[in-house]
Image: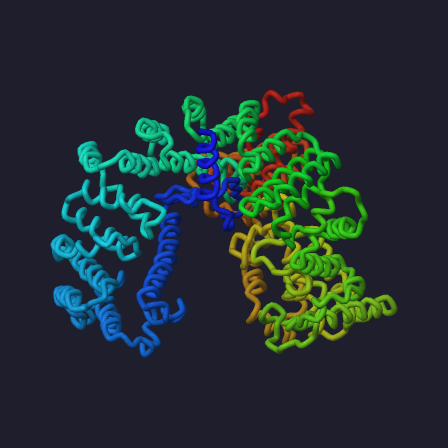
Amino acid sequence: MLVRLLFVVLFFKVVLFSCGGFWYDDGKFLFLEKRDYPFAKYEENLEFASTYNSVIYDYEKRAKEANIALWQKQLKNKFTKKQIEKIVYKNKNLHLIEDKDTLDYLAFVKKQENLVSSFYKYYSKKQKQNILKPEILIDEALEKLQKVKSKDLKKRYFFLALRLAHYKNLKPLIIYDAHKYLLNNHSNTILDDWIQGIYAGALIRNNQISKGVYEFSKLFSKDKINWHLAFYNFKYIKNQFQWDELVDLTTSKEELTKLYAIRGLSKNANIIHELKNIAKLDINSKYYELLLYKALLKSQSFFDIENSLYGKNEKIDYTNFINYLKTVKKDDMYLVNLTLGFFSYYQNSIKQAKYYLSLLKEKYSSSHEVQNLDYILFLNDIKKINSDVEKKIYNKLNFLSNNSCTFNSIEKYTFYKLKNLYKNSDLEFKSYLMSQMDYFDERSLNLDRLNKIDDLLNSKTNNSFENYIASKIKNKDIQKTLEYARIYELINNFKFEEALQSKSALLDYKVTFNIFHNSIRGNNRDGKQYEKSIKDVLTKLLNLKKTLQNKPNDVLANYEYATGIYNLSYFGNSAKLTTIYKSSYNFKSLQLEKRRIQTSIKHYKKALENAKEQEFKAKVIYALAKNELALYDLKNSRKENYNEVYNSYVFDRLYYFSKEDYKKYVVEGYGEFFKKLQEEYFNTNYYKELIKECYNLNYFQKLVKDVSLDDEFKNINRIKLLKDLEKEIQLKSRRELKNYDLIYFWKLINNIPINNKTVTLYNNIAYYLQEKRKNDEAIYLLNKVIESYPKRVVAYYNLGDAYWDSYNKFKAKKAYKKYVYLMKKLNKTNKIPQKIEQRLK
């Protein structure tokens, strides 16, 4: 008995486990080895379209390989597989075929292929008229079947005739019955599988549902090419009567267990019920193992990373499954105990998980799956991390690295778990490294992190895990990313000389446009090809700096330096100088962008101070206006939580200024340089060209006409006006309030200032505006209220609501935090609304 048991275990391990690579997707971890069962490598729902497409793609690949191998044998190994592929699938090199019957067959395949194409239904009437009728082709195939001597070609003609008859509903079952004798040679080729699938489909079309599904079930075996058809056609069994008919057709326990297994693969199946059904017949059945393995494989989604992209994992209660499996007794308990170990871990029953692990270790200590479970439980036990723990992790990883099937998941899961462990141990840099081990995101790198990475790579340490991480970072591709990121960061931080000294290959890249040139059209591009390298550009920036040190008032040097620095910003055209790629809607560092724009403004103003020529002054003022637009965008940008390892900021507006954006721009006090251009330089040729080309300037000047303070608020009872306005906004619809825009409230506040008498009325007006979803106006008024009364608690509450309603969670949370701070200071913590606490989480 012992010898028999050892043989069963050995056979199970060798035949069912496969180490030919493993499947892995971002955010997913799978710690199980492949089994050589139908559907054993698909952990997703088999009825998902994506899963079905993957199954079909895999089938077509295997079918092609099997058909080519059969042709190779049929042609007595005279041709290579590549030659046969060209002959059979591409209809090329037919001159190599000497056998006339084979050539006739290939010609017939070509003749009938349009009728069985999936595109046939899209053909025009004219196209269909040029195709031979299926009846003619079926007769021709059957006639050729009788004439040819080759058994293989006979079977191929049989398949083609049967397929045409089935697709066109031309009595395929009669053809099958007349020629099924060709299947009696007990061969198991792809042709037999294809014919079996067509026959089963024809039965279902003939309303012999149960018999058709039964015939499909015969394909459900690892040695069949089209085994997937057994599951995907099981859907035709829709009631108990059909199921009973199907069961009556079975001739053995194995066939019945197979049906239970196929039914158990459905997304709505009660797997425990089907396992019990199989157990009554044969608990040691391979179909019992298949269903149990599929349940365990599906459960591995427990380990999937939860984030904004993948969403939250569905929490499943495995109590019933665990209780059932505890009652199971099989000859080989390996998969049962492995499932119990994992399911117990999911339920946080760590003691139970370790118990089942101990049972597995007694007989299967060399199993990679057992070692994986052991390692997962080890990681689970770590609460704090230090050098001793790191050494243990390294030793275990080093041991598991021989596992080519699942080590990829083990290693990545280690980094994922360590990210939080390091963070909880206040080891922020190591936590960051763990988040980058799969792929170093250039946006997450800054000079501080780059310097720390250099220290790690160059330091001599006895910490084996740190050396392990260093060895992974020394990967050629990662080194290139780090090298380029350092250049970008040095340029971003105005360290031009240090960037030049690096002698990186990146410095030889062509910039393609002149960053020292400022054009009205094309966002500083004049259409000319600029052949200078990054090295040339940095050298010129340094030369300009030296000139300005000696001649701080040099007009041209100030202008060119200001223009170059502006073009290093997000708003310029210097992507190759500052980043691997430029996002179309967000930027990396608010402080660096502000520094560049402020530096640019400083030098433009210096150039303006010392310039004499009017045309040139107009050009400088326009450049200052563009910088002012950039400052406005930066002020109104918000932090986004797309990735926790780097700060990212997004603009309130994208690509262009809307009418409402211009209103914000004006009421927030911007537009100094646009006004100056119109008032002082309207006679210059530069201004005349500018007003034709520059949409921003053009629209701004039209809007400014509506912004002047007029007499409409004079000689009125101001308090009464505010009270009437409050009531009107409270009662009217949003559409009826369209004239109460930002410009109106800008005029209102400039004529009726916020003071002790008006502050409550303004706060209430803002509250009702926010209720009507006029959030821009509400935000403007509330910010003005807070400017005058920074301790007005309710204003922060209303401001938070307005920002939240505008989908600006960053600024909403900032306002809510200030509200909570002031409420706590007033000992009113118990009066803070619950919604604010929830939004701040």
Quarter that holds the N terminus: top left
Q: Position of residue 98 (x, y in %)?
A: 29, 77
Tell me if 4 is positioned left or right of 597 in this view: left
Q: Where is residue 166 in the image (x, y as percent from the top left)?
A: 18, 56
Give left or right: position of 514 versus 28. Answer: right
Residue 165: image location, x then y, percent: 16, 58
What residue is rendered at 49% in x and 42% in y?
33
Residue drawn at x 39%, y 41% as measured from the top left: 45
Q: How many labels does the image show?
A: 0
Residue 281 location, quadrant: top left
- Whether 107 is drawn above or below 319: the answer is below
In the depicted structure, whether residue 825 falls above or below residue 399: above
Question: x, y (%) of residue 828?
Answer: 63, 21
Horizontally, residue 173 falls left or right of residue 510, namely left
273 to 298, vertically: above or below: above
Residue 798 in sight in this render: no
Q: Which of 483 and 718 is in front in this view?
A: 483
Q: Is residue 773 visible?
A: yes
Please name whichever residue, 577 or 515, is drawn nearer the observer in this view of the structure. Answer: 577
Question: Vertically, is 439 above or below 725?
Answer: below
Q: Out of 600 and 131, give the one closest to the viewer.
A: 131
Q: In which quarter of the image is residue 611?
A: bottom right
Residue sitting at the far right: 550
Which image quadrant: the C terminus? top right
